[in-house]
Image (cartoon, grey):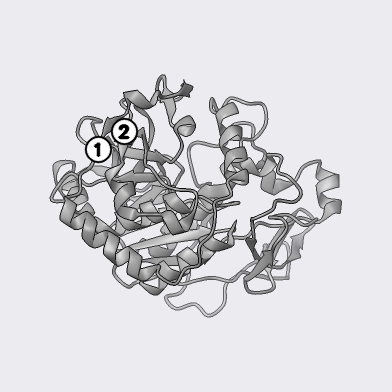
Amino acid sequence: MQIRMTTRYPGPSCKWEVFIANCSTVLNPTFFGISSSLETNVIEIGFEKPIYEKYPVLMCFAPMVYESRWQQLIFATEMYHHFGVDLQVQYVNSAMKQIMEILKIYKAKKWIEIEEFSYFDFEKEIVEEIGFHPMKEILSRNQHLGYTDCFLKYRESAEFIIIGDIDEILFPKFRNTYYTEFGIRSFLHPNAAFFMYGRRYAKIDAPNEFGNFSLSNSIESMKIAKAVFLGKSVLRTDRVETPWIHFAGLISKGVKVNVDVDDNIIYHFQITDSKVRAAKDLHTFIGSEKPENLLPFNPIPKEEIQSMNETFNLSFANLKNFKSNFVHADIIFEYFSKHGNWEDSSCITPLVAQFPENITNFECIVARRNFSTKYLNNNTAFYVPKSNFEWEENKEKCEIFKK
């Protein structure tokens, strides 16, 4: 068995990391377990088979945690579907109830898949003994674990996998489809393992109440900033072994290819002026962009916008009206704004941010799963699922860790 860290970019100051294990097995295994040459017992490890149904271009989103950004979720889902993403995979740990209702509508349309993403809730005694909660010592809410799970599950299915968040959108340059865009870039760069696109901040207009939302108005309101900052990647599944937050994690063959920012770029959409940050360089921000400095942007013909809007209205006609609640989103934004240089002495993850105990107008849904501890020997413990995932609803607070 070969064990490696899933990335060449370990989280600075984080005590835990994500690893991948490779080993040979039979063609159609019915049991998988791990043992030691010094022990007689075997720890059974559950396994999943990859998806083989063809989705040439697939989108893997970062796991949702305390998610409430329904405007960006709708905007991104509509844009990625319009330009040819065959399937969008959403990993959900915790979210506003209405976020889940929106996701279920898109799932019924077969635009997306919903994957539960739960955290290990370590025993209080273990946390006290080792002095920290392991899930709070993995970089950026453990999102590269979600990316890796998504990539491994769908790499036999997809040729290209886009890695990103729900507020990030890439508009294809070539013939208005992602498959053509990535195919042409692969032809021009046959040795490419993944394509690195820079990012620019952008803004759309969107109301705080769902009943007032207009997809066409949001599309036609797009404005973009000029400054460029660290981007995200599109992975070739036959060349990459694992993804990471911004780059490929492990590469089997090929190299990184940087897409010129004047050729194409990813836009990081916000709905409030204060969150459109001004980039000083790839890694540093200096306050917010002035609204008057943003440039109008719209790559979609008016007749296509009208058709998209009509389809959206029909799909969501029965969704009850609700108002936004960005308490969690605002706290997470402020957290990353304060820790944006990634040079802190503590692990950078919003799971350590301070959230209110009770929040009104926020019905939360959290993915739960029970785990049991099994010991291979005195030094090796496995946390093995002992139940399926369940969705837990709470009308008063969003609680990821119970212990």
* Amino acid type, residue under disc 2 in the picture: Ile
* Amino acid type, residue under disc 1 in the picture: Phe
The relative height of residue 348 versus residue 307 in the rendered view (above or below) is above
Camera-side residue of 350 and 363:
363
- Dot 2 or dot 1, earlier in sequence: 2
Give the image location of residue 270, x and y in percent: 43, 39
In this rendering, would 213 be left or right of 2?
left
In this rendering, would 120 be left or right of 230?
right
Q: Residue at x 18, y 51 (%)?
A: 302
Camera-side residue of 140 and 206:
206
Image quadrant containing the N terminus: bottom right
C-alpha separation, residue under disc 2 versus residue under disc 1:
7 Å
Residue 222 in view in this figure: yes
The relative height of residue 242 versus residue 35 in the rendered view (above or below) is above
Residue 157 in view in this figure: no
User: Is label 2 in contact with label 1 (beta carbons under 8 Å)?
Assistant: yes
Q: Residue at x 43, y 67 (%)?
A: 113
Image quadrant containing the C terminus: bottom right
Give the image location of residue 72, x and y in percent: 43, 49
Give the image location of residue 343, x and y in percent: 58, 25
User: Label for residue 297?
Assistant: 1
Q: Residue at x 40, y 67 (%)?
A: 316
Element type where label 2 sits in the image: strand
Mark 1, other Cα within 10 Å: few <14 / some 14–19 / many ≥20: some
Give the residue number, with chain letter if any, for mark 2: 224
Specify the quadrant of the image occupied by residue 80: bottom left
Specify the quadrant of the image occupied by residue 257: top left
